[in-house]
Image: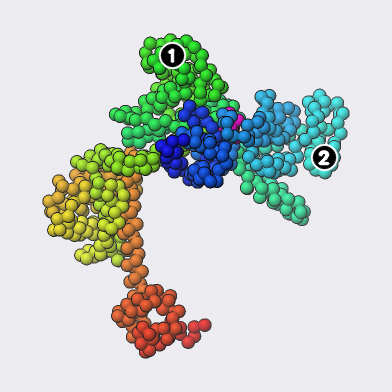
Amino acid sequence: MSVKNDTDLRRQAAALPLVPGVYQFVDPDGTVLYVGKAKVLRRRVANYFVESRLPSKIRVMVRKAVEIRHIVTDTETDALLLENSLIKTLQPRYNAMLKDDKTYPWIVIRREPFPRIRSTRQMVRDGSTYFGPYASIGVQRNLLEILHAVFQFRTCSLNLAAGEIARGRSRPCLKYHIGNCLAPCAGKQTVEDYDASVEMARAMLRGELGPTRRALTVSMKEAAAALRFEEAAIFKHRLDLLEGYSSRSVIVSPSLGDVDVFALVQDDDTAYCNFARIVGGNIVNSFTVRLSLGAEEDPRAILTAAIIQIAEKITPKSAPDNLLSSKVGSCKACDGAQRGVYSDVNDELGNERNAANACFSRQIIVPFLPEEALFPDLRFTVPQRGDKLRLLEFAEKNARMYRAEQLKNLEIKDPEKAVGRVMEAMMRELHLPREPHHIECFDNSNLGGAYPVAACVVFRDGKPSKREYRHFNVRTVVGADDFATMREIIFRRFTRLLEEGTELPDLVIVDGGKGQLSAAMPVFKELGITERVPLVGLAERIEEVFFPNDPAPYYLKRNGEPLKVMMHIRDEAHRFGITFHRDKRSADFIHTELEKIPGVGPKSVTALLKAFKTVAAIRAATPEALTAVVGRAKAMGIHAYFHPKNDD
């Protein structure tokens, strides 16, 4: 592997998120070499670049790779299930384990009279219902034990058709006599009663634990009331198991069938679309594409363009770029699971449309409908609840993670370019005459008019410049008057900047919205800087931006970087001001507490605090230590104040 490739892979690894997920090493041909799971993606993948720790086979694999892909999951268990699914689908060369057809166990409710509920590792399309898979066989066994203990389901393989039971050939077995079965084989349990228990079990396996929890609680209380404490303890133990149980993962769900998922995350000039493919309820592929928007802002048009771009990405490379002749080719993303038929077309849009119609599943999950006329053979679904909504959220999470990774890579590669992009976006969104490389934000703090202070924070190129932060003790305002306080602080700050000939900021933000902005505007006019320094107000409640002489608020894009930068600046000003306010209030309290001691004045207080730092340390000091600071007479008075004779 070249030095360039090694550097690029290390950069990709450094940009991975600190969350659970699955990672893939990919070679120049796009073939997945290795699939792994991680509790923390960045830390796990970073280990591949410490060669002294790696076997020779893994070092060779890393040298062959040119790209590290990743899929984010909610938990490590989800990552384990997804890893299993991807390895069985992709069959990577460097994965030795999990390639066989053995998979994680499921729980199946058989399609038969008096259904049995059992463990299985094979799914058979016979109308039975499957739940899982379960990454822990222990969790699955505990769950099955709970189900059978609570509902006494049968475990035998007898044919319990209505006619067979009527013949009376079966007699209750040992399980009936020890209370683990209600003997439906002998007609001692009705179909209606058994089916009601099955429905409760279905609800529990779907994650709806309420009915089962209530049934266990009732049984526990009844046993306790009848003084059957051992039986009550068993029900209590099952309740504890139930509380710690998580019913399933959305990563693998047989109810989903074959679907494709698109999730879109949009910035000012860029959009990111994540594509996830589910085959047989298993996620077999997931990746994200980046789109430059230009002047396009319609989300439907952006999603349509993303679908077309992804169709081009996953269509066979053998297909001509400008003319897709009549042929059948395997879709790379499907890994041969589907076949795409392409007809002769003369226009580029027709090529893209036919590629999309042929390459995707017939059911597609989207956050909102694209321009459906381009995809007449596809059925789009906008989910509102359930597994499909969770899948959409999964895809959106991966799109956001990819976006964060791309932005971080941009900052690592070219910090100046990243800053320029943010500054240009702020200039455009806030209608500024120039890029706001120097921003100042002002905030006030007081407690019912007491201890009034103000703060000014300075940001340069979107980052805090803490050495330029300034605190202000309010001098002229009496009581809790935020507007008058803002006028005083703005006047003092910019009068000094003008007197010293210091550069003026490219943007000034006042925290508090329209009222504080109205208080600052006359000061700008008085100092003659209205045309030189743009001024805006930012209201905290719903992030409204106010401009001078405009009563209506302006709303920045919720997911845009300009709003994030402004919120960061506003929050930093609030934090800086509150910290100063608390420190001042605390210092005043300490002085007031010490000055209550007879014979102790301001000078003695200063000396004591300089020597002992805190009131607690002064309280714990010995008379000898106090004498060394303020003399014997005052020392005895201080010690007596903190340790009266009746103090135990």
Q: What residue type is labelled 1?
A: Leu
In the image: residue 179, left or right of residue 76: right
Q: Give the range drawn in magenta.
A: 84-89
Is 175 magenta? The answer is no
The secondary structure that dominates the magenta segment is: helix
Q: Nearer the viewer, residue 193 or 161?
A: 161
Instruction: Tell me which residue sits at (82%, 28%) in the image.
Output: 165
Number of marks in picture: 2
* Residue placed under numbered mark 1 in the picture: 324
Instruction: Tell me which residue sits at (36%, 76%) in the image.
Output: 609
Q: Which of 511 and 176 is in front in this view?
A: 511
Residue 214 spot, x, y in % from top left? 65, 45
Q: Which of 276 and 94 is in front in this view?
A: 94
Q: In this picture, is 172 found above or below 213?
A: above
Instruction: Tell me which residue sits at (79%, 28%) in the image.
Output: 160
Residue 240 spot, x, y in % from top left? 66, 50
In the rendered structure, are the residues bearing label 1 and label 2 in contact, judged by CB atoms less than 8 Å apart? no
Q: Residue 588 carries which label?
A: none
Counting residues from the N terminus, which is met first, the one under dot 1 or under dot 2? 2
Q: Which mark is residue 176?
A: 2
Dot 2: what SS?
A: helix
> Is disc 1 surrounded by few (<14), some (14 to 19) or many (20+) residues within 10 Å?
many
| Residue 22 seen in the figure | no
Residue 382 spot, x, y in % from top left? 47, 29
Q: In this picture, is 532 found above or below 103?
A: below
Q: Which mark is in front, 1 or 2?
A: 1
In the image: residue 611, left or right of residue 394: left
